[in-house]
Image (spheres, grey):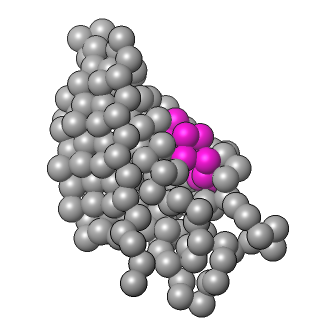
Amino acid sequence: MRKKRESKVHRKTTETDIAVSLCLDGFGEADVKTGIPFMDHMLALFARHGLLDLKIKASGDVEVDDHHLAEDLGICLGQSLKEALGTKEGITRYGYAVVPMDESLAEASVDLSGRPFFVYDVVCKAKKVKEFDTALVPEFLRAFAFSAGINLHVGLRYGSNSHHILEAVFKAVGRALGAAVRIDEREKGVPSTKGRL
């Protein structure tokens, strides 16, 4: 029986204070309190659709701007993923998902390669969803991908409502990541001809 792949990360700076607990072998349970309500909602969707158990408690200088907190959330979640993956033995490695949300259709592709790269081909017509700046989503995802050491591509096939677009994005990323971290019992090492990831 395999040990659960879990991690805990705590990062405190002069701008933010973030604690993340992540379990890759979870059920999609989320307890997320970031101080940015829209991010709480998106990260709960991400966890639920990836079947990842996620706890986040965060605070930051949101009176200045949400940017520092959003980016640092990505850093911490990425570090937590990297730690939880450990040696990456037995993982599926790749994940892909296409998710509709009403009129919007988003897709995400993930490679847990150890070589970070990030592509974001998503345009939101509305610059804000309530008080949330939609430009913070690629900042969060970029920080996540580079801190985790993963290759992440996110695209929007079509859509008009910014809330629906971003909801489809987070669900697609969650589902793609959930597929990539799954254990394949046929895999005896790491899924690479190099012998390491």
Q: Is residue 104 left or right of residue 158?
A: left
Asked if residue 20 shows in the view, the reply is: yes
- In the image, residue 81 sits, relative to residue 190, either above or below, namely above
Magenta part of the chain: 143-153
Quadrant of res 26: bottom left
- In the image, residue 20 sits, relative to residue 109, either above or below, namely above
Q: Nearer the viewer, residue 32 or 46?
A: 32
Q: Nearer the viewer, residue 119 or 72?
A: 72
Q: Position of residue 78 (x, y in %)?
A: 48, 44
Quadrant of res 50: bottom left
Q: Is residue 60 left or right of residue 183?
A: left
Asked if residue 128 shows in the view, the reply is: no
Number of numbered discs present?
Answer: 0
Residue at image coords 59%, 72%: 89
Residue at image coords 51%, 60%: 85
Query: Where the C terminus falls, by quadrant?
Result: bottom right
- In the image, residue 124 sits, relative to residue 195, either above or below, namely above
In this view, the residue farthest toward the right is 194
Q: Is residue 45 left or right of residue 94?
A: left
Q: Nearer the viewer, residue 36 or 80?
A: 80
Query: Where the N terminus falls, by quadrant?
Result: bottom left
In this view, the residue farthest toward the bottom is 186
Q: Does the magenta portion include 145?
A: yes
Q: Position of residue 36 (x, y in %)?
A: 23, 31
Residue at image coords 47%, 75%: 182
Q: Position of residue 81 (x, y in %)?
A: 46, 52
Residue at image coords 24%, 25%: 59
Q: Does the magenta portion include 54?
A: no
Quadrant of res 28: bottom left
Q: Is residue 37 left or right of residue 145?
A: left
Q: Position of residue 72 (x, y in %)?
A: 41, 29
